[in-house]
Amino acid sequence: MTNGAPAAVAEPRDTTEFHDVEARLNERFPAAIVDVERAHGEIDFTVRSSDLLAVARFLRDEPGLEFVHLADLTAVDRSELPARQRTRPGSS
């Protein structure tokens, strides 16, 4: 990047669009996906903690998906909060 041009970004190995990923996740794990956000050419899935490992394995192992990089895994520990505050707003 010596000429001031942006760095080249490698093309994805597979051309699966994000909406295909979302559809496949919703088909395989209909109750696991709590929220989906799209911004800046990326898609973020909020997954129930009890389903996280199964969803991650599916994204890695499923033919045509084969994700190889997990980024921005975050969590909120609500176990010390009073019962009324443990649940995320809008969830049951």
Image: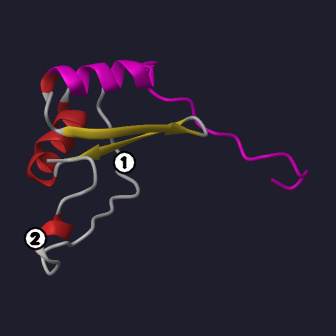
Helix or strand or loop: what does disc 1 sit on?
Answer: loop
Which amino acid is tagged 1? His
> Residue 84 at what x, y percent from top left?
15, 67
Q: Residues within 10 Å of mark 2 (few under 14, many from 20)?
A: few
Quick one: 58 or 90, which is closer to the camera? 90
Q: Looking at the image, which residue sits at the far bottom?
A: 80
Pinpoint residue 82: horizontal percent, then vertical percent. Answer: 14, 77
Instruction: Judge whether residue 15 is colored magenta.
Output: yes
* Near-viewer residue (92 or 51): 92
> Of marks 1 and 2, which one's residue comes earlier in the chain?
1
Give the quarter of the image for residue 20. top left
75 versus 90 height, above or below: below
Q: Is residue 19 magenta?
A: yes
User: Which kind of residue does numbered mark 2 sit on?
Assistant: Ala
As measured in the structure, the alpha-carbon distance from the residue carrying label 1 to the one carrying label 2 is 35 Å
Number of residue marks: 2
For the point 17% across and 78% down, which residue is it?
Answer: 81
The answer to which quarter of the image holds residue 65 is: top left
Above or below 25: residue 84 = below
Please tell me whether residue 4 is drawn above or below residue 75 in the rendered image: above
The numbered mark at residue 83 is 2
| Residue contact at pointers 1 and 2, CB within 8 angstroms | no
Mark 1 = which residue? 69
Q: Which residue does the image show at 14% across and 81% down from the upper left?
A: 80
Magenta highlight range: 1-27
**Which residue is located at x 17 percent, y 34 percent?**
58
